[in-house]
Image (cartoon, rainbow, N blue to C red):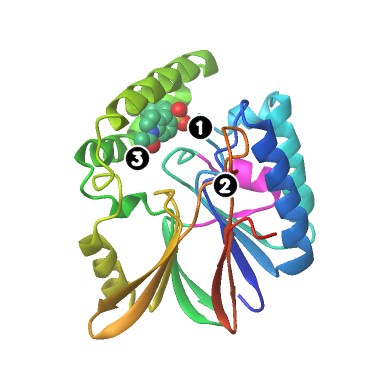
Amino acid sequence: LAGTVWVASDIHLGPETPKTAIAFHDFLDKACANADALILCGDIFDAWIGDDFAQAAPPDWLLRTLDKLGQFSTTTPLWIGRGNRDFLIGHALAQRVGAQLLPDRVCLDTDYGHVLLSHGDEYCTADASYQRFRRIVRTPFIQKAFLALSLTLRRGIADWARQRSMAANRNKSARIMDVETRAVEQAFMEYDVDTMVHGHTHRPAVHQHTVGGRLRQRIVLPDWDYDHGEPPRAGWVSIDCNGTVLHQQDW
Ligand code: OKV
């Protein structure tokens, strides 16, 4: 990856976030003008129940973003990673928008060196009930069975799962829902990188970790929301030969 790489995550687009969609589309114009590649590392969408949903007759809000991404990728390379919400994104969607799918964790070879990129939910190891949910819905035969259901049934299951999750999260502490330092440090060691970027926790920050006697940097991306209260939230990380910069609506 040569030049300037931009990374964003947790846009959480859906039928009820039109302002966030507009902000994201503006961001794509900005990325088109300033970045040599764009990586979206998970939860572009607030829910995803199968690529066929986007293929048959996508609702208006989705069609606009698919077309925008498709247009974007004709001029700038686009990579898409799956998040904890849109983990069912598949190659059909990637093809539809002209993107390449990323694996869950990927070591990017940038002008600033190796950067470990992931969505970030895999580091939330203190949240046992979430990790259980994650294991179940990531089981291939369970995914196949789910995708074989009618869209109506899948929508029903998704609504139910989201209601249950919201109820459960109300009783979880901030610490439980953040990353575990031990899981992060393990990843730094395993991938032997000095820079890590992830989203998921919605706690944008630049953290320093000393692991294996080396100072390392972990950049956490913000989520995006222009539809629920002030101030709006958005941001991205830019990576070039000079290093990394976390941008938060200073644009
Ligand atoms: C995504 C999350 C809902 C968190 C269900 C198998 C199973 C897939 C699914 C249903 C839900 C995605 C696809 C959604 C993420 C939630 C609630 C909590 C914490 C099955 C395969 F098990 F039912 F058979 N799902 N949807 N959550 O609405 O997009 O990440 S979702």
- In the image, 192: left or right of 5? left
Question: Which amino acid type corresponds to the residue marked 2 in the rendered image?
Answer: Arg
Q: Are marks 2 and 1 in contact (CB under 8 Å)?
A: no
Residue on which the image places disc 3: 138
Q: Which mark is residue 207?
A: none
Please rate how many residues cluster around mark 3, counting C-alpha atoms within 10 Å: few if below 14, some from 14 to 19, many from 20: some
The residue identified by callout 1 is 47
Ligand 1 shows up in which quadrant of the image?
top left
Quick one: quadrant of the N terminus?
A: bottom right
**How far apart are the two marked residues, 3 and 2, measured between alpha carbons?**
29 Å
Circle 2 is placed at which residue position? 233
Residue 84 visible? The answer is yes
Question: In the image, is residue 93 part of the stretch drawn in magenta?
Answer: yes
Give the left or right position of residue 142, taking residue 213 as reference.
right
Task: Give yes or no for residue 147 being in the magenta stretch.
Answer: no
Question: Dot 3: what SS?
Answer: loop
Relative height, residue 47 to residue 213 (above, below): above
Q: Position of residue 42 (x, y in %)?
A: 50, 49
Residue farthest front in this picture: 230
Q: Which residues are magenta?
A: 89-102
Q: Does label 2 point to a residue whose CB lies under 8 Å from ligand 1?
A: no
Q: Nearer the viewer, residue 47 or 33?
A: 33
Query: Which element carries disc 2, helix, strand or loop?
Result: loop
